[in-house]
Image (spheres, coloured by chain):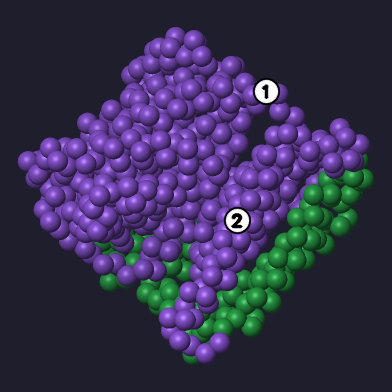
Chain colours: A green, B purple
């Protein structure tokens, strides 16, 4: 019964998220110039999309609000396995752009790699540190140096750049 | 038609240049590796490498992607046969008989038939692509906005039916994708739409972070949520690789049937390699004199589907090259690579850039030969990749995704978008929403909007001439039938069921 409840909640949250998005999208589309059918403006198609999405979201919500237990329930039981690491890695991807600008490519890449490795293998700190440093170094040599990709440089990057380029 | 041979020879002159051969080889190897790794399919590999193709020219980028796509189809079958783990969705069917063959000690034969079938199918589909694309492109030159609008709508209509799961959920994802596609500056009027005052969003939401987020990051996060089974990897000896004469005899007809079926299915929108394997498997089972062997190690059940999924890859290139419209997410990636190089695929591309088109065609031949040579002797090496612990592999994939996205535009916004789309992709998977319709709608949406607005302006707001052109009528009819027919068949079955069950069960009416 608990599983059934969780499944419905997920569907309801998804339906509400879609509905919320479509309402927000419609609210932003309304001020745009709609034009006429013979000369459609920039708001013409977005209004159609927003209205259709809102309608579909309502249908989806109605369909799932009164839904009975289905065979999908057994599949929908989410394994608790790896949940902290999943959210941790998702957090790493979100934090990476901000650390990139503040500490530069090498340190931010090493920090992201180490965090992700530790999330998946929490007990092996020294191993994670070594792997992260080697990974960041390889990435530094391949991307900014060999391929010439432009990344923000920090102190560590400047230091490494001088060593590599003499 | 007479131009094909000289053009193909010119294509070989392009593709046989050492650096292009290297790209074909690298693509084939990378594709095989991603095909072997469960979860990370050709889409993941293409999305990860999309940013790095900026360093190559357009021909090189396309050759690399073609190699990845073909290689992933080859690689996926290896784990299906040896471990009962489909490396990617198109190899699911191969598990049914391939793994049973492996358990009977015929893994090598299954792998060889799969590789040979893939090679033959790849070659047949390339011939089809070569013949069909210029022909279709000539027709497409006469298309106006109404036809392009119809093709876009037709593509999305078929996609709703073919992606599996609920049609309503597919429609919602398509609408969400179209909504994301409208973000940015309107090209006709210059009006800013849904940019929330963020100047970087004037250019719109880039396709790359969306694709990498939904397919790359979400895939990794989803993989991490599943327990690591740590399945033992079986070694294949070289002498086991040769099929018997009877196995060859039984394999060739399914390979040829699968090739033609796969190519035709590749022309329609949706996950064509996956669908083609199921259609081929069912066809072989119906045609077989021993249908009872299917699911217990029938070699036809490996040969047909493996040929079909490779042929579907070639078929999927036809609408992209001829019409400029990607009908599969992987083709949307190829479109993204072309657009990164300032090229717009479509009917004019084959005429304007013959070296690129024919070079890519020729490289597909080379890639196929390379795969045949590589795949069998190195089968143990590729399977050995599965021994790399997941806790090392997955963080590396995430890092490459992040670096890849940043390297295209050096934009922090792209990285934030990557994270958001990755988390969104994972959340949508939990409620069985497929990301493929969203990604395709993001690509097709702007084309549909532009075509509709142009068509309505031309006709002065009269919708009828937009709908009643012959090609448009055909497209809408087929699209509508794809909805009505399954519903009709379901209804007939529902009506027929009580009549069939009632008297037998003796249940009171």
Task: Find residue B490 and report its horizontal and vertical position in percent.
Answer: 56, 65
Label 1 in the same subunit as label 2: yes
Location of residue A127 by image quarter: bottom left
Q: Position of residue B417 (x, y in %)?
A: 59, 54
Q: Residue at x 67, y 41 (%)?
A: B475
Name the spot of residue A40 as percent of width and height, x first: 87, 43
Please say if B34 is above or below B125.
below
Quadrant of the rendering where the C terminus of chain A is positioned = top left
Q: Nearer the viewer, residue A10 or B17?
A: A10
Disc count in the image? 2
Q: How many C-alpha atoms fall within 10 Å of the one at disc 2: few (<14), some, or many (≥20)?
A: few
Residue B359 numbered mark, or none: none
Residue A110 seen in this snapshot: no
A76 or B378: which is nearer to us?
Answer: A76
Q: Which residue corresponds to mark 1?
A: B141
Q: Which labelled disc corresponds to residue B485?
A: 2
Left or right of B286 on screen, residue A37: right
With respect to residue A25, does A157 lie above or below?
above
Residue at left 79%, top 38%? B468
Circle nearer the N terminus (1, 2): 1
Residue at 50% over, 10% down: B3
């Amino acid at each position: 019964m608990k599983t059934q409840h969780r499944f419905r909640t997920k569907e309801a949250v998804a339906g509400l998220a879609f509905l919320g998005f479509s309402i927000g999208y419609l609210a932003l589309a309304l001020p745009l110039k709609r034009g006429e059918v013979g000369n459609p403006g920039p708001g013409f198609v977005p209004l159609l999309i927003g209205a259709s999405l809102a309608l579909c979201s309502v249908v989806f919500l109605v369909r799932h609000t009164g839904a009975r237990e289905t065979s999908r329930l057994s599949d929908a039981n989410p394994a608790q396995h790896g949940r902290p690491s999943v959210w941790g890695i998702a957090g790493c991807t979100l934090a990476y752009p901000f650390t990139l600008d503040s500490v530069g490519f090498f340190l931010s890449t090493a920090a992201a790699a180490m965090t992700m490795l530790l999330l998946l293998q929490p007990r092996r700190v020294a191993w994670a540190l070594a792997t992260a440093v080697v990974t960041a170094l390889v990435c530094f040599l391949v991307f900014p140096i060999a391929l010439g990709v432009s990344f923000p440089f920090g102190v560590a990057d400047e230091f490494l750049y001088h060593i590599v380029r003499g | 038609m007479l131009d094909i041979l000289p053009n193909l020879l010119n294509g070989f002159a392009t593709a046989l240049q050492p650096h292009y051969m290297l790209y074909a080889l690298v693509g084939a190897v990378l594709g095989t590796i991603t095909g072997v790794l469960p979860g990370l399919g050709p889409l993941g590999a293409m999305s990860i490498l999309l940013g790095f193709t900026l360093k190559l020219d357009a021909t090189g980028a396309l050759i690399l992607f073609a190699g990845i796509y073909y290689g992933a189809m080859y690689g996926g079958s290896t784990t299906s046969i040896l471990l009962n783990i489909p490396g990617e969705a198109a190899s699911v069917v191969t598990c049914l008989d391939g793994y049973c063959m492996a358990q009977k000690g015929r893994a090598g034969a299954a792998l060889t038939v799969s590789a040979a079938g893939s090679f033959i199918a790849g070659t047949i589909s390339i011939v089809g692509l070569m013949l069909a694309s210029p022909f279709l492109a000539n027709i497409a030159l006469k298309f106006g906005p109404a036809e392009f609008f119809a093709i876009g709508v037709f593509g999305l209509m078929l996609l709703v039916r073919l992606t599996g799961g609920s049609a309503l959920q597919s429609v919602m994802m398509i609408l969400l994708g179209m909504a994301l596609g409208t973000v940015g500056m309107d090209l006709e009027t210059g009006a800013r739409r849904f940019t929330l005052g963020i100047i970087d969003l004037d250019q719109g939401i880039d396709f790359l972070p969306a694709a990498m987020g939904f397919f790359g990051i979400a895939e990794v996060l989803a993989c991490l949520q599943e327990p690591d089974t740590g399945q033992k990897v079986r070694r294949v000896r070289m002498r086991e690789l040769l099929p018997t004469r009877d196995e060859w005899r039984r394999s060739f007809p399914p390979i040829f049937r699968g090739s033609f079926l796969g190519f035709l299915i590749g022309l329609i929108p949706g996950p064509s390699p996956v669908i083609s394997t199921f259609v081929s498997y069912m066809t072989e089972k119906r045609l077989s004199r021993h249908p009872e062997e299917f699911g217990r190690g029938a070699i036809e059940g490996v040969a047909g589907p493996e040929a079909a999924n490779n042929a579907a890859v070639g078929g999927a290139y036809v609408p992209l090259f001829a019409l400029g419209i990607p009908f599969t997410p992987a083709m949307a990636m190829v479109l993204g690579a072309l657009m990164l190089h300032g090229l717009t695929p479509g009917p004019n591309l084959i005429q304007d850039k013959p070296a690129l088109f024919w070079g890519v065609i020729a490289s597909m031949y080379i890639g196929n030969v390379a795969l045949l040579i590589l795949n069998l002797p190195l089968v143990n090496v590729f399977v050995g990749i599965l021994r790399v612990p997941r806790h090392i592999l997955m963080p590396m994939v995430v890092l490459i995704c992040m670096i890849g996205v940043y390297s295209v535009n050096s934009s922090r916004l792209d990285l934030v978008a990557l994270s958001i789309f990755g988390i969104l992709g994972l959340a949508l998977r939990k409620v069985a929403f497929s990301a493929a319709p969203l990604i395709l709608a993001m690509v097709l949406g702007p084309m549909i909007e532009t075509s509709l607005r142009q068509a309505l302006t031309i006709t002065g707001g009269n919708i009828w001439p937009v709908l009643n052109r012959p090609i448009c009528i055909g497209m809408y009819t087929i699209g509508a039938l794809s909805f009505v027919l399954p519903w009709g068949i379901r209804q007939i079955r529902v009506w027929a069921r009580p009549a069939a069950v009632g008297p037998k069960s003796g249940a009171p009416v």
